[in-house]
Amino acid sequence: MTDSGTIYFMAYNQLLPAYKRRSLAFVAAFLWLLLCALSATSAASAATITVYGAVSLTEVLQDLADRYTKATGVAVKLSFAASSSLARQIDAGSRADVFLAADQEWMDYLEQRNLLRAGSRHNLLGNRLVLVAPADSAITLKIGPKFPLRAALGKERLATGDPDMVPVGRYARSALLSLGVWNEVADRLVRAENVRSALTFVARGEVPLGIVYATDARVDLKVRIVDVFPVWSHPPITYPIALTRDAVPEAAAFVSYLRGQEGRAAFEKFGFLVLP
């Protein structure tokens, strides 16, 4: 500043009443605090958590993610598919912060490759395995050892997930083996890419029977539950959850939310068993 400018500024400062100087200082401080608050809100809004979830969790996770974003401003991006497909995507380098699978094997798959954050894995949910038919079907069956599944199918096929890859198909194969009927129907399977695809085959009447989770049967009014498989006939259906190795910091809070009271209430509402 020139000498004349300095003199002018000093004169102006002396002439400006003290109360006006204090007012200006207050306004400046207020604007600074407002800018900080807006910056913090903007940063929270910019945060995005990417969740890979088994397709059987579609409705409940969407419900919880929407509520979480509304409460925190943190966006949650959801991707649903068979656990096998999601695990292989993560292994191939796809961006994910949280993985929620429908069985232990595909979570093991990622853990063995050091793609999960140590200590973040927990068993979150349980489910039941059911035999379903189109809602207008007259088929009745009581599931038990050597039950007449092949006879009920006639010349038609049985839909479930691919037993070589998809969790629901693995549970189905275990159950049918335990009940002594696997060999009768192994060559009559429609090997769906995920549990919802198997459900769709039944809902459209393309097959007379399918094996899905109880929670999936609840979301489609075009199917009905014929019977529930005994819990002893297959390994426990569990949904493990974990953070990925490179998860963003916000992801841990979202997992805690899913494991908290609001998450529990939502999972139970949609028919899942919340594990201790």
Image: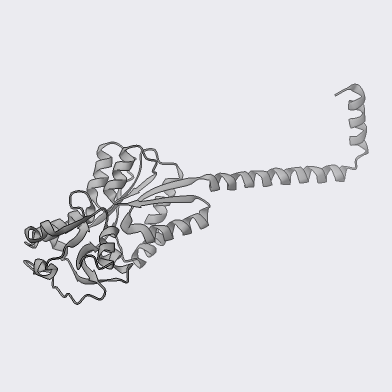
Which residue is at the far top?
Answer: 3
1 to 146, vertically: above or below: above
Which residue is at a point 49% across and 50% down the rendered structure image? 75
| Residue 206 spot, x, y in % from top left | 23, 65
From what the image shows, is residue 8 above or below residue 250?
Answer: above
Q: Is residue 275 visible?
A: no
Determine if residue 54 is in view.
Answer: yes
How many marks are shown on the rendered structure? 0
Q: How is the image coloured?
A: one colour
The image quadrant where one finds the C terminus is bottom left
Residue 67, percent from left and from top: 47, 59
Task: Kindly identify the residue that appears in the image at 6 percent across and 66 percent down.
Answer: 146
Quadrant assignment, res 118: top left
Q: Position of residue 51 (x, y in %)?
A: 39, 49
Decide which of 209, 116 is in the foreground and name it: 209
User: Picture quarter containing residue 210?
Assistant: bottom left
Q: Is residue 111 left or right of residue 15?
A: left
Give 212 or 156, whichever is nearer the viewer.
156
Q: Residue at x 32, y 68 (%)?
A: 220
Q: Quadrant of the N terminus?
A: top right
Examine the rendered structure and indicate whether residue 262 appears above or below residue 116.
below
Give the x, y percent position of residue 74: 50, 50
Judging depth in this view, the residue of 47 and 262 nearest the camera is 47
Q: What residue is drawn where x is 22% and y is 68%?
A: 132
